[in-house]
Image (tube, coloured by chain):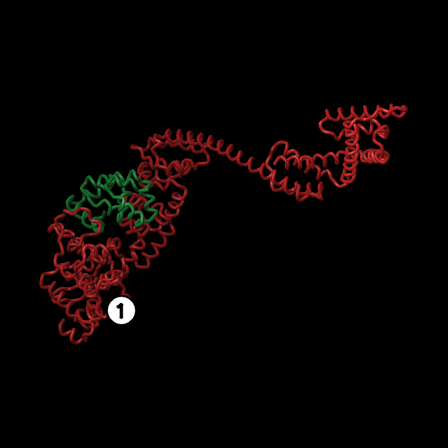
Chain colours: A green, B red
Amino acid sequence: MINYLKQLNITEEQIAKLNSFLHPEILENLSLMQNNVMEVLSFLKEFGVKNIFDIVKFRPDICFKNKDDLIKDLTVFDKELLLFVFNNDIDDLINFNI
Amino acid sequence: MLKGKKLLLEIINNALLAYQSGSNEQQIAFNNTELKAFLSTYKNPPEDIINLSDEMLKNITEFIDPIEEQKKFSATIKYLRGIAELNKNKEEKMLFNEQQKIKLIALEELIKNVIQHNEYLIEHSKTRSEKEINKYRKILSKIQNEEIFTAKDYDVVENIIHNETPNDAESNLDLIYTYMNEFNARKLQNKKEDQKEIKEVSKNDRTVIIKEIVNSLGINYDTLNMQVKLKFLGIKDLESFSNLAKFLKEEIVNKIDSPNITGLIYLLTNSNKNLIDEVITEFEKSSIEFKKLLNTGTTIFSEKGLKNFKNNKEIFVKYQVSLKKLIRNNITILTTDPDYLKSIIRLLEEKNINVTTIFERIPFLLEPKGQNLIEKNLKILDMYGFDVNTFFGENPIYTILGSWNLASKLDFFIEVGLNEQIHKSNDPGLELKNLITKRIYYAYKNNYGVWTNGSQYLSKQDESLPFEITRVSVPKILKVENEEYDQIILKNDFLITEEIIEQIKKDYPIMHLIDEAYRAAIYTEAPVGILKRKTEYVFGTQIISRLKVFKVFKILIDLNLDEKEALFFAITYNTILEPHEYDFINDAVSKIEIGDNYDQLLKTA
């Protein structure tokens, strides 16, 4: 269902982890909305985010955001600071209203 | 098999003949009387044959099969009767040859058989009803048309055989059932093959039609995975499917800039024109683009999704949630199970948490698993000495409820001496949130890990980040793979409670000793004293989170690590230590002996 994430260098092992960690409803949404998920995650990867796996695991809601809306949210903060948060601890994104 | 078939046909034909003969029963009886009378005088066949009338001969030869033989036999008998007539008036008689004598014996046998047969007909013609005879005819028709015998037919045949051949019923049934079974088996096999062929042809036709319909929407059917193909092939009503595809092509596809294949497939397999129209009408008022709905909230186009949304709409209205904000921040909440939403709202209200704020600012907490996360974080707050009812002040910021590792953040602030500051604040929730933000900025500016002292966040993929600090000294003591244990601890979602702590102290006296010896020496009942004794150890100048120590110790002990090693690892886990602090803890753990009394231990502390 979410094998398409391999295109973003998420490994087979990580996909297995996601399949066991995420709620089936979230997995279904990730599968159904793969166009949007790929658009958002590809953008984040290009933005400099290395922690794509953690985004899907801990903050799948970001994957279901509209890319343009997400860009607006991100531009409020310093890019380097955001990348530091993204690549360090996804948990802290919420403190930046993301 | 042929024997059985022949026997069954013979029995049924005879029965039908007997039934048909029922109307001229008297004639048969008369014929039989004549034949019997003839036989009684048939002592010297070459002469007595003259008593056989043409009518009698006709009645006898009717039973000979085939018809050609009837005529041949009849002609021979008439010829012999003519000789017998001639001999009657002649002194010198013509003699019969051996062949002719045999024919006369055969005639006698034939007459006997006919008499027996006629008697049978007379006896049985009275016992068959029209209904029964129809059953006989049905079986006969089945044999002639080579139709499969049903279980009911087996019962009918059994009755026929018992009725018509009561003395040989069992042996006859053996032969007849063998025939019926073999016939059925052969027939079913042929039928199965025929059906398979028909099915394959029809399946192929369906696939071609479905493929054409799917391709008409710009979706390459051949490239779809098997799961999707099976979904399409499972569609029963091809006409409706075709109409839906036509509708999508004419009305919907142009509303999507780039092809959203999975979205279109979802509409084809889970939606219909009415549902789509309803969703469009519903969101037109809020100026929500169709494309956005399909891309980010696909499930709303299903019957269940739309039903959930309609129920959830009442909740959104009740809590004055902006639909636009919700769609922007987490559209999937629209179609979440309303019962789940209600249960999570109950939990939030019990803790005086503003539901609208959660909906609009942290909607991911309303996703599945969100409730577990909220409950877990509320328990953590309680365990770390906070009153969850007053934790969030007048301008509540609930972001920490969405934290996956709140406990380690609290451990961090305890160990840098900020525990009291958070608790003393009028708005501990805001204070904690501000400290978290400050820590992030500080770590960012100084290239430190935010919440780690080297044991990196579990899934961090970039190993080259500059803020990584390696905990070099610990492995020398422990002789274990620290990284492996770090990961196990990080993965472990285990929540420490006072009950678990008491149990650990009972099971492992070393923990009882450490708990007595290194808790903060504030023995007042003032809140700060209770808090510090609940949450802190003091090793020289270093504060260590008590709850962290118990949690990590329990995890490591469960992995069969030595008690002292587990304790040392637990104290130093994720802690930034100066060399003298490290030495202090090392000494403290080394000195603990289970046999020591508390006074001695306290003196060394």
The residue that appears at 55% across and 35% down in the rendered structure is B186
Q: Quadrant of the N terminus of chain B?
A: top right
Can you give x and y, in whole percent of width and height, for residue B305 in the image? 38, 43
Query: What crowding class fits label 1: few (fewer than 14 Cα within 10 Å), some (14-19), or many (20 or more)?
Result: few
Instruction: Using the image as rendered, state which of residue B378 and residue B543 is in the foreground.
Output: B543
In the figure, is residue B402 to the left or right of B311?
left
Measured as percent of width and height from the top left, residue B561 is found at 22, 62
* Pick the front one: B286 or B420: B420
Specify whether B578 is left or right of B86: left
Give the quadrant of residue B583.
bottom left
Quadrant containing the C terminus of chain B is: bottom left
Q: Quadrant of residue B397?
A: bottom left
Q: Is residue B61 above or below residue B136?
A: above
Residue type indicated by callout 1: Asp
Chain letter of the residue beneath label 1 in the structure image: B
Secondary-structure class at tag 1: helix
Residue under numbered circle 1: B507
Q: Is residue B487 above or below residue B41?
A: below
Q: Nearer the viewer, residue B220 or B76?
A: B76
**Can you tell which quarter of the image residue B580 is in?**
bottom left
Q: Count numbered badges in the picture.
A: 1
Residue B177 percent location from the top left of the image: 62, 41
Is residue B221 placed above or below B498 in the rendered structure?
Answer: above
Q: Nearer the viewer, residue B503 or A95?
A: B503
- Is residue B277 visible to the viewer in this orientation of the structure? no
Taking the spot 15% from the left edge, 70% from the top edge, the residue there is B591
Residue B568 visible from this viewpoint: yes
